[in-house]
Every structure is written in C-alpha cells, then in structure tokens.
Amino acid sequence: MALACRIVAEALEELKGLVKPGVTTLELDRFVETFILDRGGAPAFKGYRGYPNSLCTSINSQVVHGIPSPHSMLEEGDIISLDLGVYYDGYYGDGAVTYPVGNISTSARKLLDVTEDALYEGIGMARPGYRISDISSTIQTYVEKKGYSVVRDFVGHGIGRSLHEEPQIPNFGPSGQGPRIKEGMTFAIEPMVNAGDYAVVIMEDKWTAVTKDGSLSAHFEHTVAVTKDGTVIMTQLKKD
C-alpha cells in the first residue's frame, strides 16, 4: 500500500506544476496515466464502474468525479480538484488535492485552506480506541464553525486490497458511533466542502457532481494507516 500511495503522492505533486491557464483536463489525465504506468502501477479509477479516465478533474462548482475532456480548459482564477487512485501489486492508494489555477480570489483560497485543514483535523481522530464517527464529527464541526458545509452524498472509506472497503467514513454526523478504530486499519479520509449549501446534483454524464447552488467546492484526501506508533499519512511525500 505504501508503494501505491507513494505513486499517488508523487503524481499529485507533479500535477501541481501542470495546473495553469490554457491546459485542458484531458492533458492532465493523459500525463498522470503515463506517470502511473511508467512506475509499474495501474490507474485505479479507469474502468471502475465504467469510469472512462484515470483522473477525476472537478473545476469550481464541480464537487467530485469530473471527467477529463479536451474541451475543458483551465482559466485564471479557477480551482480544480484532482482525485487519483493507483493500484500496485495487489493494493490501492487514493488521494485528492484542490489546486488554484493562477491567482485566485481570497474567498476561494480560504475555502481551500479550510478544506485541507478539515482533512488533518479528521486524520487526527484516526487513532486506536476512537470510533469512525469521531472522524466524521470532527470534520463537520470544524467546517461548519468556519461557515462552510460538508457534502453528504459522498464519503471516505476503508481501502486496501480493494479501492473501496468498509467502513464508510462520512464527513458529518455525531461522534461516538460506528466501528472502533484499531491498529492496522487503513482509511481514505476525504472531506468535500462547499462554500454554500451542501446539496449536490449529478450531471447528465452520470458522474460529475456539482453544487446545487453553484457555489465553489474543494476536496482533499489522504490514505492513512493506523499504527502503534501513530497515524501514518501514506499519500504524503516525505520531507527531505
């Protein structure tokens, strides 16, 4: 899993340098697919339940599962959420980031910061003895305290030999419920946060989810492992 997650982390870091005005989402998708294959992995999303690409590219009010297209070109001031999964030697890694395209508004920057901070708040609860919903409650409380809303239609999840495993990890709900967290568990924790209301709708392509009110949305995700020495963020590049 660590190897699969490392490819995810490296790919998302490489994409950061490619996200700029004038680039199409299909260009990002093609780059990342080649990147994964060159490292001996396989794109986890391509073909999954019929999804046509290797990368999910969701711009501005798109929440998740945006499909890359040669007609979808990034513009100055956009934000883009990039969600990526990798399969490597029997195991999966999953991660997501939201990047600014050039200079973005102060309000968009705050949304990105709050969403990423909420992810780390949730990861802080992924410890032995806590319950799954302690992660959920912590994320919701943090996000709503900042004046935003958490998407309720999509959830984090267990991950390992399958891309999506039990338990589901919502980003909302009361604490103290669900399975107790134990050493050895591996999760994909992924808050999706809207600047407006939490309601989303699915577009005609049957994949792309957008905010119902047209507000901006951001998405950050890490795959983590619960160990006796603490929570390890496997999709985070190690600092030299």
Image (cartoon, rainbow, N blue to C red):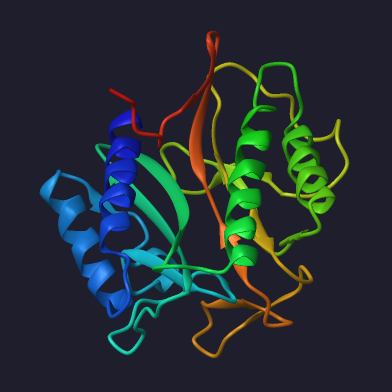
Q: Is residue 156 above or below residue 109?
A: above
* Res. 210 image quadrant: bottom right
Q: Nearer the viewer, residue 147 or 162?
A: 147
Q: Is residue 19 above or below residue 114?
A: below
**Relative to 172, 159 lies left or right:** left
Q: Is residue 107 visible?
A: yes
Looking at the rendered image, the quarter that the N terminus falls into is top left
Q: Nearer the viewer, residue 209 or 92?
A: 209
- In the rendered image, the residue lying farthest to the top is 228
Q: Position of residue 43 (x, y in %)?
A: 28, 56
Q: Position of residue 178 (x, y in %)?
A: 79, 35
Q: Position of residue 145 (x, y in %)?
A: 84, 48
Residue at the image point whose x is 74% and y is 16% from the top = 129
* Res. 8 image quadrant: top left
Residue at the image point whose x is 71% and y is 62% from the top = 151
Q: Nearer the viewer, residue 77 or 93?
A: 77
**Relative to 172, 191 lies left or right:** left
Residue at the image point whose x is 28% and y is 32% from the top = 3
Q: Is residue 39 above or below residue 22?
A: above
Residue at the image point whose x is 65% and y is 27% from the top = 124
**Relative to 150, 207 lies left or right:** left
Q: Is residue 167 visible?
A: no
Looking at the rendered image, the quarter that the C terminus falls into is top left
Q: Position of residue 17 (x, y in %)?
A: 27, 57
